[in-house]
Amino acid sequence: MSLVDLRRDGDVFVLTMRAGENRFNRGSVDALNAALDTVEASSGPAALVTTGAEKFYSNGLDLDWMMGEGQAEASTFVGDVLRMLGRFLVLPVPTVAAINGHAFAAGGMLALAHDFRVMRGDRGFFCLPEVDIRVPLAPGMTALIACRLSPSVFRNMVLTGARIGGGDAVAQGIVDEAVAADEVLPAAIARAAALASKDRQTYGALKRSMYAAPYEVLQRGALP
């Protein structure tokens, strides 16, 4: 089974992560970048929705892989993840994260890199647990989170490691809506389809202008 499945639903590309907890390792990051290449190479109206196949949206970095098979490239790999997040942030088509389950750490950051977020309301948490797992944020991660969340929510999420459910995530402005489990993907696709006809050149230019500072930091990778 492929790590990532990319299909079209009308004008909307639907990217489904199919690797269990959907943690980021070399294989999954390469697959995600390849999917973005396909979206960017397409023509005509388009938007992108990402989701997970099971109970996880994404659980972030694959620390077991980074300490094992990927140890030799662990330091440079984090930079590759940050640059991938930067691609999502300024992708020149509308993007919606369909958060079907847990979105933790860099998985939550992937969701934040999208233009809009739809989350499951009954189960699953959004969480930035770095304070509890003793992993400092890279500058690009901090810049991405800060550009998406209000100052108080940013402080609380990063310094407490709180697990936030769908309803509270809406109230705090982390996601745009929380719906029943079977409505997450349809709601995300509907939101994306409504924006798919936006001119790509204009849409991309606006995003690059809006997010110029965090994008620059993400592009530097893990460097301070």
Image (cartoon, helix red, strand yellow):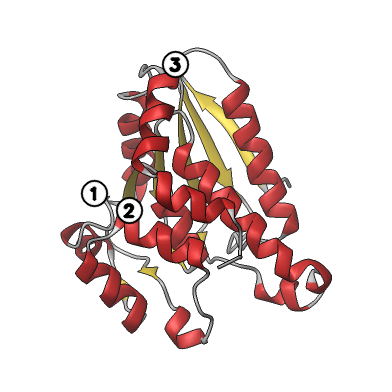
Q: Earlier in the sequence, mark 1 or mark 3?
A: 3
Report the disc number at residue 45. Answer: 3
Rendered view: 88 above or below 18: above
Rendered view: 137 above or below 54: below
Amino acid on which disc 1 is placed: Glu
Q: Are marks 1 and 2 in contact (CB under 8 Å)?
A: yes
Amino acid on which disc 2 is placed: Met
Q: Residue 67: x, y in percent?
A: 75, 78
Q: Quadrant of the C terminus?
A: bottom right
* Residue projecting furthest to the left: 171
Amino acid on which disc 3 is placed: Pro
Q: Between tags 1 and 3, which lies in front?
A: 3
- State the residue at coordinates (64%, 32%): 37
Q: Earlier in the sequence, mark 1 or mark 2?
A: 2
Callout 2 secondary element: strand
Q: Is residue 61 left or right of residue 57?
A: right
CA gap, disc 1 and disc 2: 6 Å
Rendered view: 100 above or below 207: below
Residue 52 visible here: no
Callout 3 secondary element: loop
CA gap, disc 3 and disc 2: 25 Å
Rendered view: 22 above or below 177: below
Q: Residue 93: x, y in percent?
A: 44, 28
Q: Between tags 3 and 2, which lies in front?
A: 3
- State the residue at coordinates (41%, 57%): 144
Residue position marked by numbered label 1 in the rendering: 177
Callout 1 secondary element: strand
**149 or 50: nearer the viewer:** 149
Q: Residues within 10 Å of mark 1 (few under 14, many from 20)?
A: many
Report the disc number at residue 119. Answer: 2
Q: Is residue 166 left or right of residue 96?
A: left
Q: Residues within 10 Å of mark 3 (few under 14, many from 20)?
A: some
